[in-house]
């Protein structure tokens, strides 16, 4: 038996053992209810802010773009109606519910046209010192469709990011990325905080390596490019965002715990310019194509030519562009950590392979499944959560030579002018 066959049998055995073990530690997320840009999804953003050692306020932002508005008859206004359910658990998939409730969010529209906006709401959780897992469900009463979201609640320390509330122009910020020179207001509840340290990072990171790469992943090193301190007389302070990079705000000199705020272009999570389009297309470009596009004085013409060559026609090239950079946008939205989402391991797999059939989540990892789980050839990507003071959304792929053929098959499919969607049964 040759070495490759032995290796293949070992991989298949490991995968079958995983499939057989109990999944009680995991919550299952079919990707058609999240992480799929091809579906009309409700955008539900969540921020937790610890008021004290027993109460946490959860702020909600619901984009109304995909809500269904109805009116009982032609004389009345249009209404959208959402019922929000929440459960606070000790950990994912726990049967013990620590706090739960439900409430309604309404929106009333006069006239014939619904304007795009955000619906804001909030509720309080009974949460003492400790770590928790919050499950949320938004039910669109008119459409009879539900959407789910979740959030880790960290309450072991008064210096973690959820002890700070970031606002922009008097509104809670449901994102941690801003434009250069924007001024954000940061509030905190702890009276013990009299000074904060702001670490400034300017480092640019490259794209993720292929899933079969043997290159050793570079360890995240906490080395700020510059540092400054702010002495505080009240429980809030202002920060002006840098022209690039990110800030990490710490309230304890002895700890790296804190709040991270990024500066991105105004188009983020979308792609901003031809230079960025070239960079995030690296996953399906060969070295020569990539260097040619990077060195071209006319970068827009170069990247357009690349896609036209793949598509064979303007119409097909436009469709490829739309779908590929649509995945880049979704990767940025869901997988950004201390780098943009398209540069991460999860972003790389999502862009090349598309949304998986199922995602299994636990406290320590995510397992993405492509294909029928009973099929021995089904792909399973395991992403382990990294303890990173800069982000709670940092995951690293367990790389393997097992992925080589599947990865090149997907890349070749793109290069033949097709949109790769895994459909193995």
Image (spheres, rainbow, N blue to C red):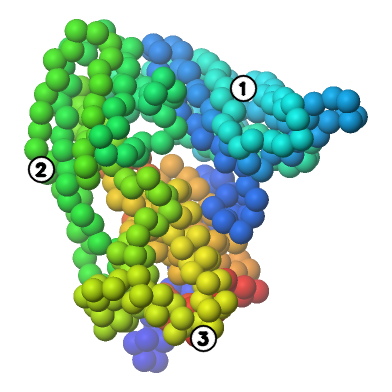
Between 102 and 155, the one nearer to me in the picture:
102
Above-or-below relation of 157 to 134: above
In the picture, the disc for residue 24 is: none
Helix or strand or loop: what does disc 1 sit on? strand
Q: Is residue 238 above or below residue 418?
A: above
One can see residue 205 in this view: yes
Give the percent coordinates (x, y) of residue 158: 29, 19
Q: Quadrant of the C terminus?
A: bottom right
Callout 2 crowding tier (Cα within 10 Å): few <14, some 14–19, many ≥20: few
Residue at 35% x, 60% y: name it.
Answer: 273
Q: Which residue is mark 1?
A: 100
* Horizontal side of residue 112 vs 423, given as left or right: right
Disc nearer the start of the sequence (1/3): 1
Q: Which residue is mark 3?
A: 312
Is 233 on the left or on the right of 351, as rendered? left
State which quadrant residue 195 falls in. Answer: top left
Q: Residues within 10 Å of mark 1 (few under 14, many from 20)?
A: some
Q: Residue at x 31, y 26 (%)?
A: 184
Q: CA distance from mark 3 to mark 2?
A: 46 Å
Disc 1 to disc 2: CB gap under 8 Å? no
Q: Residues within 10 Å of mark 3 (few under 14, many from 20)?
A: few
Mark positioned earlier in the residue sequence (1 or 2)? 1
- The residue that mark 2 highlights is 225
Q: Considering only order in the chain, which callout, 2 or 3, is on the residue closer to the N terminus?
A: 2
Q: Give the secondary structure at mark 3.
A: loop
Question: How many callouts does the rendering have?
Answer: 3
> Residue 105 location in percent, x, y?
67, 24
Q: Quadrant of residue 200?
A: top left
Residue 297, image x and y in percent? 23, 74
* Left or right: 156, with 139 as reference point: left
């Amino acid at each position: 038996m040759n070495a490759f066959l032995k290796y293949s049998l070992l991989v298949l055995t490991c995968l079958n053992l995983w499939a057989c073990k109990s999944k009680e530690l995991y919550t299952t997320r079919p990707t058609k209810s999240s992480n799929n840009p091809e579906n009309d999804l409700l955008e539900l953003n969540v921020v937790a802010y610890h008021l004290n050692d027993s109460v946490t306020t959860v702020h909600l932002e619901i984009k109304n773009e995909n809500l269904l508005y109805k009116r009982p008859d032609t004389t009345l206004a249009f209404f959208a109606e959402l019922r929000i359910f929440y459960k606070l658990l000790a950990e994912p998939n726990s049967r013990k519910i620590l706090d739960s409730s439900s409430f309604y969010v309404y929106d009333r529209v006069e006239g014939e046209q619904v304007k795009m906006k955000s619906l804001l709401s909030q509720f309080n959780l009974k949460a003492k010192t400790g770590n928790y897992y919050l499950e949320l469900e938004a039910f669109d009463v008119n459409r009879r469709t539900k959407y789910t979201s979740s959030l880790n609640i960290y309450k072991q320390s008064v210096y973690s990011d959820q002890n700070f509330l970031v606002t922009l122009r008097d509104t809670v910020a449901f994102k941690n990325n801003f434009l250069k020179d924007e001024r954000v207001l940061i509030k905190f509840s702890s009276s013990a905080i009299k000074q904060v340290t702001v670490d400034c990072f300017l480092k640019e990171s490259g794209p993720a390596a292929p899933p079969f790469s043997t290159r050793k992943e570079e360890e995240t090193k906490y080395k700020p490019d510059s540092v400054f301190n702010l002495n505080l007389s009240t429980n809030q302070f202002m920060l002006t965002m840098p022209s690039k990079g990110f800030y990490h705000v710490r309230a304890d000199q002895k700890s790296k715990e804190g709040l991270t705020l990024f500066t991105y272009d105004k188009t983020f999570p979308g792609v901003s310019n031809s230079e960025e389009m070239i960079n995030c297309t690296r996953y399906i470009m060969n070295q020569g194509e990539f260097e040619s596009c990077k060195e071209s004085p006319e970068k827009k013409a170069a990247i357009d030519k690349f896609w036209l060559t793949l598509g064979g026609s303007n119409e097909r090239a436009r469709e490829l562009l739309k779908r590929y950079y649509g995945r880049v946008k979704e990767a940025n939205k869901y997988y950004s950590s201390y780098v943009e989402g398209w540069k991460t391991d999860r972003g790389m797999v999502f862009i090349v392979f598309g949304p998986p059939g199922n995602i299994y989540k636990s406290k320590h990892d995510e397992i993405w499944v492509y294909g029928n789980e009973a099929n021995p050839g089904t792909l399973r990507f395991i992403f382990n959560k990294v303890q990173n003071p800069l982000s709670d959304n940092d995951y690293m792929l367990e790389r393997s030579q097992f992925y080589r053929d599947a990865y090149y098959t997907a890349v070749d499919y793109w290069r033949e002018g097709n949109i790769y969607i895994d459909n193995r049964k």
